[in-house]
Image: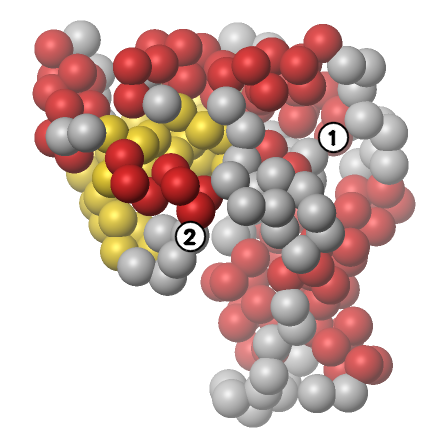
Amino acid sequence: MNDALATEIANATARIVVEEGLEWGAAKRRAVKQLGLPVRTALPDNDLVEDAVREYIGLFCADTQPAELRALRQLALVWMERMEQFRPYLAGAVWHGTATRLSDIYVQMFCDDSKSAEICLIDHHVDYEPRSVTGFRGELVDALSVSSLSPELGEHIGVHLLVYDLDDLRGALKPDSRGRLPRGDIAAVRALLEQPDEVF
């Protein structure tokens, strides 16, 4: 794939991600379609898309995105504390700092018993929708999706509690291609919230 085409697709993807809140995979495929490219066109890697997303936010959302990101992280922390017994880790755009108010929150939980998290929600009378989503190794994992009000944003945000086996935690903390942790626990999210807002 040539660099110019990869960059063009990444930039179109970034606009869709930021303006519509789509996940990166779906946004890449829509970008290819919008650009009139063949369906089988090679897609840019996530590092290139992340750079494009950060650049787009810096150009068009720098005045609003830091506060929105903080609100999402605060809401994520609420859910992580509620589900603390299931070893929750924040992942995705809210963890990496590229989220806006349109982004959903993804909390990955590592459980001894996959049904125990679901039973916990039932016991606390939480309305949730069970579904299957693609996990971080490309496999299908159970997700418990809730709609939760963010007081700061004044709107409901999708919170997806992904249920992994406890054994999956071993490989989950390997640094990504840029040497960063791909997810963070409660202490790491609290530490992020103690820092000044990120500026793009």
**Which element carries disc 2, helix, strand or loop?**
loop
Q: Earlier in the sequence, mark 1 or mark 2?
A: 1
Q: Which amino acid does label 2 sit on?
A: Phe
On the rendered image, what quadrant is the N terminus found in? bottom right
| Residue 103: numbered disc | none
Q: Do the residues labelled 1 and 2 touch (CB within 8 Å)?
A: no
Q: Is residue 39 visible?
A: yes
| Residue 65: numbered disc | 1
On the rendered image, what quadrant is the C terminus found in? top right
What is the crowding at mark 2: few (fewer than 14 residues within 10 Å), some, or many (at least 20)? some
Residue 86 position (above or below residue 82)? below
Left or right: where does residue 186 sit relative to residue 58? left
Q: Distance between the residues labelled 1 and 2?
A: 26 Å
Look at 40% across and 10% down and name the residue there: 81
Residue 63 position (above or below residue 135)? above
Provide residue 168's location: percent of width, then percent of height: 33, 43
| Residue 136: numbered disc | 2
Q: Which of marks 1 and 2 is in front?
A: 2
Q: Nearer the viewer, residue 170 or 34?
A: 170
What is the crowding at mark 1: few (fewer than 14 residues within 10 Å), some, or many (at least 20)? many
Q: Quadrant of residue 93?
A: top right
Look at 31% across and 51% down and name the residue there: 133
Left or right: where does residue 105 sit relative to residue 109? right
Q: Quadrant of residue 111?
A: top left
Q: Nearer the viewer, residue 159 or 168?
A: 168
Q: Which colour scheme is used?
A: secondary structure
Provide residue 14's location: percent of width, then percent of height: 69, 57
Residue 52 position (above or below residue 175)? below
Q: Nearer the viewer, residue 63 or 194?
A: 194
Left or right: where does residue 146 sit relative to residue 127? right
